[in-house]
Image: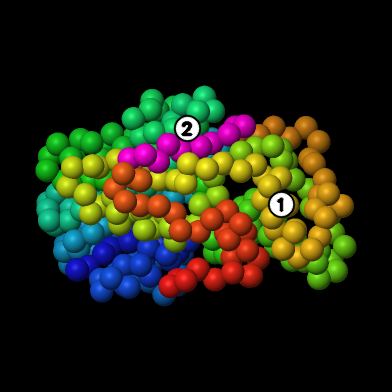
Amino acid sequence: MKALIFGMNGQDGHYLAALCRSRGMEVVGVSRSPGDWLQGDVADLELVEGLIGAHRPELVFHLAANSTTRHDALFEHHRTIGQGTLNILESVRRLAPQARVFLTGSGLQFVNTGAPIAETDPFDHGSSYAVARNYSVQASRYFRGLGVQSYVGYLFHHESPLRKPNHVSQKIALAALRIAAGSGETLDLGDLTTRKEWTFAGDVAEAMLTLVDQDEVHEATIGSGEAHNIAEWVEACFGLVNLDWRRHVTGIEGFSAEYPVLLSDPRTISGLGWRPRVAFGELAALMMGKYRVPGV
């Protein structure tokens, strides 16, 4: 079996590729960034057609995206998420109809009232990111009607040591390590009361494969369904290096959080047998270099 992964350079691509290989699959990875994979853009139809036609994969994953919700990323989102989705789905329909396609969705594309969000909840259109994600989902449903086995996993906040330093979880973990080593710095953070999920990216990769294994279920929110505020993450990371975080962290005056809480309702994916293995405290320890996930 062969898996074709677009967006290979990110944390999701890393853990998904490792998981596929552990199950005996051949993996072909693609990313715009240079690295140990094919360099290419999912928005390039000729490239996508060529790869799908040449490799005839059984699984195709579209993980490529810029996760920002800023308006100035509007055309980037349209190209990578929207056009990339069409390129994959039409190429699969014509050249590899046996393939199953996984498209990444996001908890940020739904109306968020603070209640747990399920895949059946209404979509929002409050950001350029949400608009592109919603377009991708509608395309998936359209091509499903044309016979393509297309799946959407709506991902909520998930983390790993591969996160870039600007992501809040990694920013906090790295700062705690530097301060423990004597940097003397102060960490400036926004709204510490913001509540979100903290799921391990390797567990999320497991959920992706669980979903594409299904014949009848094609969409599911993927998350732990367990929320912690940012202050809890700060406390967990600083506690692992025996520091009182209140002596080293200050708030950013006038900061306004994008949302007060973002939480999934994972009953569909849980009903398929998936559960996250790595707990909140273990994830903090993993990102602080003090824990290793068995088998990863």
48, above or below 146, in the image: below
From which residue to which does the magenta span run? 259-268
Judge by depth and name the residue closer to the eye, 45 or 263.
263
Q: Would residue 77 be found to the left or right of residue 24 on screen?
A: right
Q: Amino acid at mark 2?
A: Pro
In depth, the one of 52 and 266 nearer the eye is 266
- In the rendered structure, which amino acid carries the disc numbered 1? Val
| Quadrant location of the C terminus in the rendered image | bottom left
For the residue carrying disc 1, how many other residues have a C-alpha within 10 Å: few (<14), some (14-19), or many (20+)?
A: many
Q: Residue at x 41, y 62 (%)?
A: 13
Q: Is 110 or 51 nearer to us in this picture?
A: 110
Residue 82 visible (yes or no): no
Displayed quadrant of residue 161: bottom right
Residue contact between numbered discs 1 and 2, judged by CB atoms under 8 Å: no
Q: Position of residue 291 (x, y in %)?
A: 59, 69
Q: Is residue 26 left or right of residue 267?
A: left
Colouring used for the render: rainbow
Residue 141 vertical position relative to residue 186 in the rendered view, above or below = above
Q: Give the residue drawn at x 82%, y 45%.
A: 250
Q: In which image quadrant can residue 29 be found?
A: bottom left
State the residue at coordinates (73%, 35%). 255
Residue located beneath label 1 in the image: 234
Q: How many marks?
A: 2
Secondary structure under the numbered disc 2 in the rendered image: loop
Residue 28, compared with residue 195, is above or below; it is: below
Q: Earlier in the sequence, mark 1 or mark 2?
A: 2
Residue named by callout 2: 116
Q: At numbered mark 1, what does the secondary structure look like: helix, strand or loop?
A: helix
Relative to the observer, which residue lies in front, 109 or 192? 192
Give the quarter of the figure containing the N terminus.
bottom left
- Whether residue 127 appears in magenta in the rendering, the answer is no
SS assignment for the magenta stretch, majority:
loop
